[in-house]
Amino acid sequence: MFPKDFLSIADITADDIHNLFDLCAKLKAQTKRGQFVPYLKNKHVALIFHKPSLRTRFSFEVGVSQLGGHPMYITDKEIQLGVRESIYDAAKVMSRFVEGIMIRTFSHDDVRQLAEHADVPVINGLDDLLHPCQVLGDLFTVLEHRGNLNDLKVVFVGDGNNVCNSWLNAASKLPMHFVLARPEGYDPNPEILENAQAAGISTIELTDDVEAAVQDADVLYSDTWTSMGQEAEKAKREAAFAKFQINAELIKRAKPTVLVEHCLPAYRGKEITDEVMDGPHSIVFDEAENRLHIQKAIMVTLMDK
Ligand code: CP
Ligand code: NVA
């Protein structure tokens, strides 16, 4: 059974993922036809943001509205989770008003606590550890472009960050060859890495040799070198990651059909060049759009009860 909340890809099964992809395809096709089924009629969804956002905010606000529900955008200035009152109290009170909560914040433990105490579904819209909605949308986008996810080699070029951790969780459920090309010292969460390796579903490698890593890649993935909350380390990180750029030269080493993804926002000229972002291999804007459709599938799965 699908869990009450969607906090991590590690919490769901491969079947759950495939069911979400099927529902996502159906909802996307309906949306394109202008057909909006009110699965969340009269339901309210709190969208709590403790970090900036474009895609997550737009896709959840539009998604809830398209499903006939009411999104409520809330910043850290209002509820001040854990500061003005405890996460427990806030979770109990919000559950009396809304039928679902999406949260983007810093601490993954806070997200877990909120979900534990809320009587309504909680969705993780990014924290310091994970970005699960993003990676499901990314995989769905690859599936759309490629037709299947068979024999997939994904090379994540950059930081072992929240997005990378969610890719590792995905690799613990769906078979793939996943390579993280990063400078030494910018590794993913060790427990998540170990669990993904122990799952025995995928081949998982870490390397600092980016040119060797991208050989035969089906997907090249990029994210910012400096995540939200790490701004003080920007200069140090830009120096450490200088070689870890997705550019036209690097792409030549991958398969001719390689797809390039980036969760966005992109720092053009840093982790990815304009030429690649705007080039024929890039699927970054389809990927951004699919946040809408995959999150609608997640909300329907959790809240259409
Ligand atoms: N990719 C993503 O989550 O974008 P935002 O930070 O703009 O929401
Ligand atoms: N790793 C990035 C993802 C942004 C969507 C961050 O956490 O800032």
Image: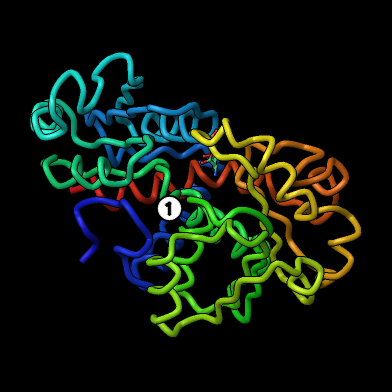
- The color scheme shown is rainbow
| Residue at position x 58%, y 56% in the image | 186
Q: Could you tell me which residue is drawn at 63 percent across and 75 percent down?
A: 152
> In this view of the protein, can residue 173 be seen by the observer?
no
Furthest-bottom residue in this view: 200
Relative to the observer, which residue lies in front, 124 or 142? Answer: 124
Q: Position of residue 66 (x, y in %)?
A: 41, 33
Q: Is mark 1 within 8 Å of ligand 1?
A: no
The kind of secondary structure element at disc 1 is helix
Q: Say left or right for 143 vs 195.
A: right
- Is residue 127 positioned above or below 8 on the image? above
Ligand 2 quarter of the rendering:
top right
Horizontal side of residue 131 vs 288, given as left or right: left
How many marks can you see?
A: 1
**Quadrant placement of the N terminus:** bottom left
Residue found farthest to the top = 77
Residue where numbered disc 1 is placed:
132
Tell me the residue at 28%/14% (across/down): 78
Within-10-Å neighbours for mark 1: few <14, some 14–19, many 20+: many
Up-down: is 141 above or below 201? above
Q: Is residue 29 visible?
A: yes
Circle 1: residue type: Pro
Q: Position of residue 283 (x, y in %)?
A: 71, 51
* Residue 303 image offset from top left, x and y in percent: 23, 45
Q: Residue at x 10, y 35 (%)?
A: 88
The relative height of residue 4 versus residue 252 in the rendered view (above or below) is above
In this view, 2 is above or below 95: below
Q: Which of the 4 image quarters holds residue 2?
A: bottom left
Q: Is residue 254 left or right of residue 131?
A: right
Q: Nearer the viewer, residue 205 or 273?
A: 205
Q: Quadrant of residue 45?
A: top left
User: Toward the viewer: 199 or 186?
Assistant: 186
